[in-house]
Amino acid sequence: MTVSYADVAVGTALPAQTFPVTRFHLVRYAGASGDFNPIHWNEKFATSVGLPDVIAHGMFTMAEAARVVTDWVGDPGALKEFSVRFTRPVPVPNDDQGSQIAVSGEITELLDDRRVKVTLTATHADQKVLGNAVAIVQLA
Amino acid sequence: MTVSYADVAVGTALPAQTFPVTRFHLVRYAGASGDFNPIHWNEKFATSVGLPDVIAHGMFTMAEAARVVTDWVGDPGALKEFSVRFTRPVPVPNDDQGSQIAVSGEITELLDDRRVKVTLTATHADQKVLGNAVAIVQLA
């Protein structure tokens, strides 16, 4: 499945997704990424440095936002450029539900060579956690 | 440990790091990120779609590049913005050594509010795998 440049326009929405993030996710992400900073798994440490709770790795949030693009376009190689501002951390409570990261996106510009600019919105508890989240995507 | 704006200049180099990436890393990253695309763990599938081998998740490479910044500055919250271009995939052979992603960085601009622009270079086998990799970092 690929998305054709001919089938999209400025304003075309990508299918939104909501990603759960629990302490269990963060421990796995620590092991996978090699980033074992205790703010991502040790509540006592996190609060001692002024955080409200354990927080998600910013790169985890960024990766979930990218998935909305790659799941839509059907080819991870189509994601050519990706940039974000880390505006707010995602606190992750110590329960089975954890937190939810809601990601939506829409095409905000048609570029040359069948590429498009996608602007993403990622929120937790209705507050933006990423700012200026922009993906440049190669369409078919 | 934090880095002071007063102690840096354009040209200041960040400590370079080399990150191994094996099939084992990619399986763990798949589980942590939720991105189970078989191009990242199934050689038969990867080659069937024209890739040279299983390739690393682009977001894994991007995350390792970010670590050179956060390990240097000592505070993951200091990474304010991050953008990359995905220029070339990192193939990951099926052996214990896997591949190596070498990441270096240097300050390329002094910004206001004690922020700096860091330009990162990420290579595999002496070829750039990320282009225009730029981090905006808040110093003390």
Image: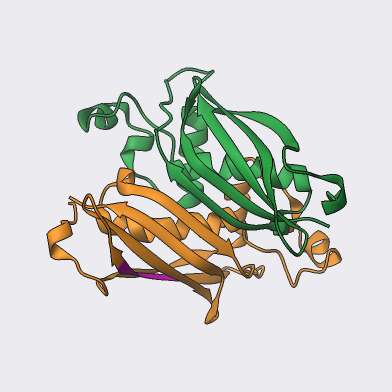
Chain colours: A green, B orange
* A138 part of magenta stretch: no
Instruction: Say above or below: A129 vs B31.
Output: above
Q: Is B103 one of the magenta-colored residues?
A: yes
Secondary structure mostly taken by the magenta-highlighted segment of the chain: strand
- The residue that appears at 52% across and 60% down in the rendered structure is B84
Choose between A77 and B10: the one closer to the eye.
B10
In this rendering, the answer to whether B26 lies above or below B87 is above
Above or below A88: residue B121: below
The answer to whether residue A70 is visible is yes
* Residue at image point 25% right, 32% down: A45
Residue B36 visible within the image: no
Displayed quadrant of residue A103: top right
At a point 78% along the width and 55% down the height, the residue shown is A139
State left or right for residue A64 relative to residue B55.
left
Q: Residue at x 34, y 61 (%)?
A: B117
User: Residue reaching furthest left?
Assistant: B6
In the displayed structure, A86 sits above or below A82; it is: above
The residue lying toward the viewer, choosing from B55 and B108, is B108
| Magenta residues (range) | B102-108
- Residue A137 in the image: state x and y as whole percent: 69, 54
Q: Residue A3, image x and y in percent?
A: 83, 49
Where does residue A43 sit, x and y in percent of width and height? 31, 27
User: On the rendered structure, is A136 left or right of B14?
Assistant: right
Q: Nearer the viewer, residue A118 or B53?
A: A118
